[in-house]
């Protein structure tokens, strides 16, 4: 029988839909164990962002940083250039409307 210290999460995917915006947004967060690198990899496919770490929490923290940085750059670019038609733009705008606590909750529900 495995002890709690021996249990390892290999992969987990959580899909959350945000309905409080005009067009509902779906966020797909996947966390998987990468044994050859000895790390967890966290991904958000809608924003094409990844984070990694020795623990699931570290991977999600890195993902949150990546999402925030990507959202900032994308929204700034769209404000300067009205021709930007990136499908991630509604996601970026939504993420920037969140407090860091709400972004953390979005990811922690994973």
Image (spheres, rainbow, N blue to C red):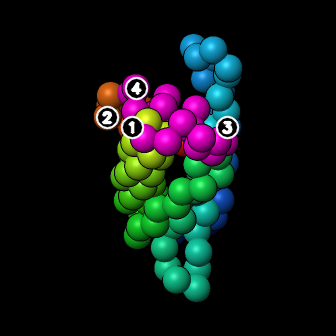
Which one is nearer the viewer's eye here, 62 or 22?
22
Mark nearer the viewer, 2 or 1: 2
Q: Position of residue 29 (x, y in %)?
A: 60, 47
Mark nearer the viewer, 2 or 4: 4
The residue identified by callout 2 is 100
Q: Is residue 104 left or right of residue 13?
A: left
Q: Residue at x 52, y 83 (%)?
A: 37
Q: Is residue 12 left or right of residue 103?
A: right
Pointer 1 or 3: first along the chain: 3
Alpha carbon separation for disc pair 2 and 1: 6 Å
Secondary structure type for disc 4:
helix
The circle drawn on residue 104 is 1
Which one is nearer the viewer's eye here, 32 or 20?
20
Above or below: residue 65 compared with residue 104:
below
Alpha carbon separation for disc pair 3 and 4: 20 Å
Q: Residue at x 41, y 67 (%)?
A: 53
The residue identified by callout 4 is 97
Q: Which residues are magenta?
A: 80-98
Asked whether disc 2 touches disc 1, contact meaning CB atoms under 8 Å apart, the reply is yes
Q: Is residue 81 magenta?
A: yes
């Amino acid at each position: 029988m495995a002890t709690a210290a021996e249990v390892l999460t290999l992969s987990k995917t959580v899909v959350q839909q945000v309905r409080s915006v005009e067009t509902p947004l779906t966020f797909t967060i996947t966390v998987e164990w990468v044994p050859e690198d000895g790390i967890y990899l966290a991904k958000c496919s809608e924003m094409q962002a990844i984070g990694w770490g020795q623990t699931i929490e570290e991977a999600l923290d890195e993902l949150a940083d990546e999402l925030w940085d990507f959202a900032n750059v994308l929204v700034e670019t769209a404000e300067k250039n009205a021709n930007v038609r990136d499908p991630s733009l509604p996601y970026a705008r939504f993420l920037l409307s969140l407090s860091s606590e709400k972004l953390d909750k979005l990811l922690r529900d994973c």
